[in-house]
Image (spheres, coloured by chain):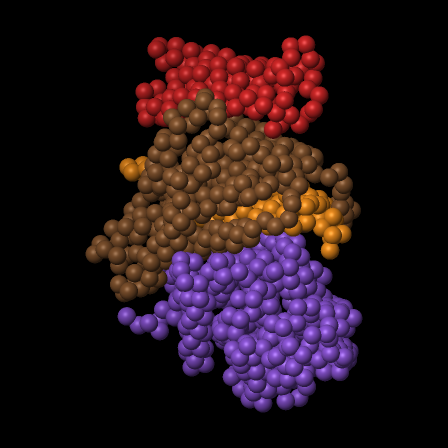
Chain colours: A brown, B red, C orange, D purple
Amino acid sequence: MIFIFAVFLLSLLVITAIAIVRAKNLFVAVMLTSIFSLLMAANFFILDAADVALTEAAVGAGITTVIFLCALSLTDDREKPREGSRWVAFCTVGVLALLIIYATFDKPRLGDPDAPVHQHVAPWYLEKTPEYIDIPNVVTAILGSFRGYDTLGEVFVVFAACIGVLFILSVKPTKKTNQVIKKESGLRHHLIPQVVGRLLIPFIVLFGLYVQFHGEYGPGGGFQAGAIIATGVILYALLEGESSALRAIPRSVLLGMVVGGALLYGGVGVACILMGGAFLDYSVLATDPVVGQQLGILFIEAGVGMAVCGALLSIYHAFAARESFS
Amino acid sequence: MIDIILDILSWILLLLGGACVLIGGIGGLRLPNFYARIHAASLTDSMGNILIFSGIMLQAGLSLATLKLFAIMVFLLLTGPTATYALANAALLSGLKPDVGSASDEPQENKLK
Amino acid sequence: MKLLELLGYFNYWVFAIILTVGLYAVISKTNLIKKLIGLSIFQSAVFLMYITMDKVEGGTAPIITAGVDDQIFSNPVPQVLILTAIVVGVSTLALGLALVVRINECYGTIEEDEILDAD
Amino acid sequence: MDLLAHLPVLQVVVPMLSAPIIVMLQPRGLAWAGATATSLVSFAIAVALTLAVLDGQAVDYAVGGWPAPFGITLMVDAFSALMLLVVTGASAAALIAAKPSIDQQIESARQPLFYSAWLLALAGLVGIVVAADAFNIFVFMEISSLASYILIAGGPDRRALPAVFKYLMMGTIGATFYLIGVGLIYMMTGTLNLADIDARIGNVSDINPLFVAAGFITVGLALKAAVFPLHVWVPNAYTHAPHMVTAFLAACATKVALYVLLRFDYMVFQGNLIEHVVQFSMFAMPLAILGILVASAVAMFEGHLKRLLASSSIAQIGYILLGASFVSVAGLSSSAMHLFNHALAKGGLFLGVACIAYHYRDLRLSQLGGASTRMPWTCAAIVVCGLSLIGVPGTAGFISKWLLINAALQSGSWGWLLVAIILASSLMAVVYIWRIIEALYFQEPIAGEAKISEAPIQLLLVTGIVAILNIYFGLFPQVPLALADSAAVLLLEGVL
């Protein structure tokens, strides 16, 4: 039963992808991209990847769409009706498709428990997580501890994106642009969305905090939490206007969150060195290594959450502030 | 015995909900103009939402999952109509007049913004 | 069993199709935002490939329930990798969009050929 | 607590963690000072690591204390030590020299963000070099790429923006290809650690996915490394980037991608996949030769100084790839040497360009008249680095070209043909370097030339030192040669 549903979802995914590429209006394309992400999240969930599904839904369907819409409101929403090098594209893409399909014939089929991917490293993680770290969510254990160095890198990717957007958009716009000057924040004077929004935003943020601190026990963690809380604040900014959102959380605080979060993560790693372990070896943080691991994961997840939330909000504000310039 | 009754009841609710959403979907495709379409989509959506969630809650029985489902249902009941309102409002502000007789929306983009 | 086997390949085929659709958009479209949308589809396809390989028949999400011993878990490693990759994807996208906004301010267009003509 | 044992991770962590601090530094000048200090510290760490490697100990590090296939490990051997020296050295030199040039090109309010991005680029590049885990390489590749996009987007010309956008597109496609390849390998072997993949990949019975993975990884990294037909992002990106950024990235960014390509291919695929050695040669050699000839020819007719040098960079990537395509110790060590020497020569040239650009707004060759009388030291340094690029005896460039020719002669009966190609392209290099010299020395001075004086002292000093290093390593190439030789032996261990 679930497989029929999966096939249905996958087919929808393909249809949506084709529709996105064919759509001439960029708003339509962006909304379809959001749907695409949501379908992708559903697929991930069917394939037992709850954490990834949550992330894809929060980041892919939520934040990405908002950033796309911000950028669209600053540019043109219509694609000019012309194609580039269509034949080159078709040839490249055709070769690529053949290559991949050639590869699929030897791939282990879906769900085969004897596939090599389930043999070597993965069972070790599943087996040793209760012993070394003792938290139920193995994904969080690997993310935070076993492969914590990757996650540190990931936080710095987000940090790089944040300073990049701030750097690129810190140039004052000089020339005229072809955009329509907008009324400030379309929803500002509408009672119903405002009331509902005020009702919902505390719960969104609360849910974000739940995801943050429940990450060791269920799906969730710093990235998802940061994205969800950022979504809540962005909703507030849409309803109450850009400036009141900035009054609530000023830019400097956001930048401080990004810097603080990144430094918190790195600082935990350095603290581990200072206390005699390897970089990011949380076992030395407490007398009992298992407690130390849990403590370390708690700290670094907090760092990740802060950094991601601050970075996404900084990026949003950098785009949104652009509108008021012109 | 009570299990079977609950099961049947929940399936009835689920099927009704599914039918509601399906009708809404058809309405969204077939109705002539923007306001008629969102009217079809939003009303059936709310109804389908209640029916489907009630059905699933009956399946789940008394557990934590039911509480979560209830929370999600309330969330959707709040956001769905609000989103519809915002959509209609934006359409109105961008100059799309509600007109019972009109067969289609001339400026196609208007319903997208 | 038969269905599952078919679905196994179906997942990879969908991966191939989405990948090619995304890459096609990146190569053939001249609109910069459309290119970025294509890029994000292209990346999503890779996520699907990774997550497809983590599935184990009869498994559940890798969250250990206390007291239950004989659970089968799906593979947690690809999930961790893709969590990272998703965040990398959105970061690249944000940076790309910031560039598009600046390009639009400097050139007054976001069509690649018009930008090339302008210089 | 033995600090020496932590050096591999400190090499990455020091610049990475300094980046957020730099953003917060309030008086603006501090940002440059902090970034430079950090860069010098990481150069010192690289030197310490190199000394340890030269002592004969390969330096391993298990991050988080988790053993090899389960946790992420770092590894520094001769090849990575050589790369570390190049990357951190280029960054330190460029940063010391950078202040006047950057002050001129980037508003002071934006500078903390800029220097922070610089450190992230540095951290990403060294992170790639020390990584011993396939996915970890991807993560750090993305850090360095995002940071380089930012750095290049700092260019004052609006044409920098489309150039970066193109780079972003191609860079992301390259990284995603690499990710697909890693995914396929992980699917077939169940591990991500490079050494562990090497150990397990031989047992895989279904070969098709591995072949496809090798293809994806090679093409993806070739995109990042600007190997000939995939180089289209390079000329614009290098031309319109801030001058100091060009000096830094031209010296090391594409080479790090090439380093990963060589390491991955030699360590994982060759020796484990049947016929792969031949396939690799057949793939790399034609591209390398075409790249050398076409890019040199393009450089001969290029009218813009930076664009000319960028084209020449593509040709140099061709030399490095050509050496690698012989799959022999001699070829690989010539590649590794050329990585080092080209970084010296091209870094020096772009530093010289930055000196000239401090006064000359228009860098077309026709607009550079009179530079030699007004900026004699800068022009002398450019000439020295140019000679090194050509491969004149006595300069660093000669060593690697000589090794390359030797390797070509050893490689088989058609070796003389390759030697002919190398000589022909060297002649082309003579032509394009001569065009620069002609523009600097023998051209009518441009209007307003009288006001021009020598570049600021710190910029000039660093340029001069790099030029002198070009001669020094031409006369005393023992240290890089020792590293390059043992790197070649290490890489070929699994193959032969």
Please state if A230 lies on the left or on the right of A29 as rendered.
Answer: left
Q: Give B100 or D83, whichever is nearer the viewer.
A: B100
Q: Residue D382, how many percent across, how many down? A: 64, 80
Total numbered labels: 0
**Residue positioned 55% across, 32% down in the render:** A183
The single residue placed furthest to the left in the displayed view is: A287
Q: Residue D432, how many percent across, how many down? A: 74, 76
**Residue positioned 48% across, 29% down in the render:** A188
Q: Is residue D200 visible?
A: no
Q: Is residue B105 visible?
A: yes
**Residue positioned 44% across, 16% down in the render:** B50
Q: Residue C113, how many percent across, how many down? A: 74, 49
Quarter of the image for residue D43 reads: bottom left
Please state if D111 lies on the left or on the right of D398 as rendered.
Answer: left
Where is A181 relative to C94, above or below?
above
Quarter of the image for residue C6 reads: top right
Where is A227 relative to A240, above or below?
below
Please state if B78 lies on the left or on the right of B102 as rendered.
Answer: left
Q: Residue D318, how many percent across, how many down? A: 68, 70
**Residue positioned 63% across, 89% down in the render:** D394
Q: Give C75 or D159, whichever is nearer the viewer.
A: D159
Quarter of the image for residue A73 reads: top right
Tell me the quarter of the image containing the C terminus of chain A.
top right
